[in-house]
Structure formats: C-alpha cells, structure tokens
Image (cartoon, rainbow, N blue to C red):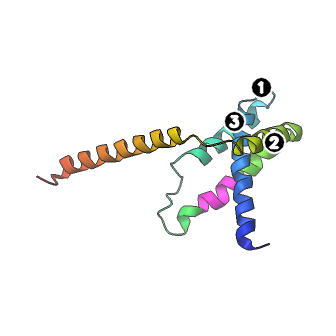
C-alpha cells in the first residue's frame, strides 16, 4: 500500500470520527464531560477558523495535524466504546449519501457575497477606485 493510500484512509477515518463525535455530543447517553469535549472538537474541526491560520508556512498546518487528532483521541476515550462504535457506523453510512449541490451553491453564494462586501468596504476605507 502506498503512503498516499494510507493518508487517504487516515483522512477518511478522521472525517468519519469528527461526524461520529458530533453525533455523540447530541446523544443523551453520552456523559456530559464527553459531550463537552466532543462538541468542542467537532466544532473546531468543522470551523473555517483555525487556531493557527493555514497561510503561515509549516506552522499553519500543525493544529490540523497535531491538535485535531489529539482532541479526537481524547474525546473518543471519554465516550463509551459501544456508543462510539454505534456513532461511527452511523457516520460511515452517512458518508455514502449523495451531496446536496443546492446547499453547495448556496454556501458558495454566501461566501461570494461576503467577499464582495469586504472588497467594497476596503475600497471605501482606503479610497481605492476614486
């Protein structure tokens, strides 16, 4: 097996575990402290805002490569194994579902509007184009 295939499997497992942690955080059978950690890890993993911005060379990806896997490991250890296995299976099944293209277009539109609003604000702020 090549290192690229191994990396793809690892990334798929991380993605599945983040979804499973989100599901576990919403499950009433999960202990409160495990819910808190699982929710924080899932929110951080799904958030577009990083602790260390990715544009910073090398260091920018350290949070994704170190902090996220460590947070996942901690949250998984706090959740009862049978419950985590159940949520992993649910997340695995959900990964095979079709993707909503309409939602992707809507999110892309929101980003485009936000970028345009920022550009207009910057142009007015710094007097560009006047």
Residue lying farthest to the top in this orientation = 28
Please state if 20 lies on the left or on the right of 80 as rendered. left
Quarter where residue 24 is shown: top right
Sequence order check, earlier mark of 2 and 1: 1
Distance, label 2 to label 1, CA atoms, is: 18 Å
Please give the name of the residue rendered at 30% of the width and 43% of the height, measured from the top-left corner. Answer: 117
Distance, label 3 to label 1, CA atoms, is: 12 Å
Distance, label 2 to label 3, CA atoms, is: 21 Å
Please give the name of the residue rendered at 69% of the width and 38% of the height, measured from the top-left corner. Answer: 22
Please state if 120 lies on the left or on the right of 68 as rendered. left
Pinpoint residue 64: horizontal percent, then vertical percent. Answer: 61, 58
Name above or below for residue 7 compared with residue 115.
below
Quarter where residue 29 is shown: top right
Pinpoint residue 37: horizontal percent, then vertical percent. Answer: 70, 40
Please state if 118 lies on the left or on the right of 43 as rendered. left
Q: Residues within 10 Å of mark 1 (few under 14, many from 20)?
A: few
Q: Which residues are magenta?
A: 62-69
* Residue matched to label 1: 28
Q: Are marks 3 and 1 in contact (CB under 8 Å)?
A: no
Which is more toward the observer, 27 or 95?
95
Which quadrant, please, contains the N terminus? bottom right
Pinpoint residue 69: horizontal percent, then vertical percent. Answer: 70, 55
Sequence order check, earlier mark of 2 and 3: 3
Please give the name of the residue rendered at 72% of the width and 48% of the height, measured from the top-left corner. Answer: 16
* Residue matched to label 2: 89
Q: Magenta span has 68?
A: yes
**Image mark for residue 36:** 3
Q: Magenta span has 94?
A: no
Please give the name of the residue rendered at 28% of the width and 49% of the height, measured from the top-left corner. Answer: 119
**Image mark for residue 114:** none
């Amino acid at each position: 097996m090549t290192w690229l295939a191994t990396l793809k499997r690892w990334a798929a497992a991380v993605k599945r575990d983040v979804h499973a942690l989100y599901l576990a955080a919403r499950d009433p059978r999960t202990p409160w402290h495990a819910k808190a950690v699982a929710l924080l890890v899932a929110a951080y993993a799904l958030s577009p805002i990083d602790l260390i911005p990715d544009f910073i060379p090398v260091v920018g990806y350290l949070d994704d490569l170190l902090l996220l896997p460590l947070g996942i490991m901690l949250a998984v250890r706090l959740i009862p194994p049978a419950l985590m296995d159940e949520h992993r299976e649910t997340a695995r099944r959900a990964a095979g579902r079709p993707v909503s293209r309409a939602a992707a277009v809507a999110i892309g539109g929101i980003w485009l509007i936000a970028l345009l609003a920022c550009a207009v604000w910057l142009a007015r702020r710094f007097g560009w184009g006047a």
